[in-house]
Amino acid sequence: MTGIELKRSEFALVQVVMGKDKNLSAKFIIAKNNNGEIFEADGTLNYKHQSTESFQAKLSELQPYLCSIKKVIDNEDVKSKIHVKGLKLSGSGDNEGFEILGSQNSDGDGIMKCDSHKIHYEGEEYSWLEEVRDIAEEIENKTFSYLFEGDKAQPSLFEDAQEVDENEDEKLDFDEAEEVTEEQEVSEEENTETEE
């Protein structure tokens, strides 16, 4: 598969997870404009090289919010055992929101999953939602830079990366990508709102 030049505006992050070696696995959607026609493709890329310290620091900024969601913000012992490993973004408009993906060290050597539920930015449950939105935007920018502007993001990007395809469909092939009309976009947004 040949490399594809992408603009930041064509990239939308769905999920990013940092592995134990500080590498990143990301799911995303690309919407590319080709002479007025919009083509969409989704993909998953898993790189082996480490993420930057600035990315790791930005991801860790979500830890207090995850602790707040889990209602352990005042329990220093439990807080110290909770770690953020990723972020999931979904929805649009009033349905736009996030999930913080984390883990918690249990007594002994065990590790438990510690993800938040989906929280809408337009909700009134928490006072700090705009702060998380800003952090999420920076994480999305840094993920794009990691995938497409990093040291290994050369034209042979898609050959160098280990491409993961859970559905066995070829990803990011814009020659075969489905053309998305305005009517389809409206219909898909309505379906998303109905489901959520």
Image (tube, grey):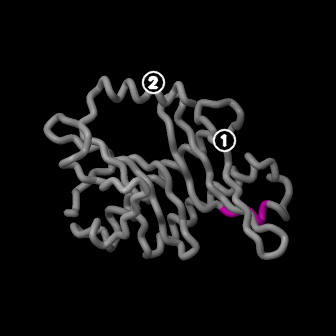
At horizontal 31% and vertical 23% (from top left) the residue drawn is 183
Residue count near mark 2 (Cα–Cα under 10 Å), binned few <14, some 14–19, many ≥20: few
- In front: label 2 or label 1: 2
At horizontal 68% and vertical 30% (from top left) the residue drawn is 124
> Closest to the observer: 8 or 31?
31
Q: Which mark is residue 128?
A: 1
What range of the chain is rendered magenta? 79-83
Q: Is residue 150 among what the camera can see?
A: yes
Q: Quick check: 31 left or right of 82?
A: left
| 4 in relation to 51, above or below | above
Tell me the CA gap for discs 2 and 1. Answer: 28 Å
At horizontal 46% and vertical 27% (from top left) the residue drawn is 191
Residue count near mark 1 (Cα–Cα under 10 Å), binned few <14, some 14–19, many ≥20: few
**What residue does disc 2 label?**
190
Sequence-wise, the earlier of marks 2 and 1 is 1
Q: Secondary structure at mark 2?
A: helix
Q: Amino acid at mark 2?
A: Glu
Q: Amino acid at mark 1?
A: Trp
At horizontal 21% and vertical 67% (from top left) the residue drawn is 155
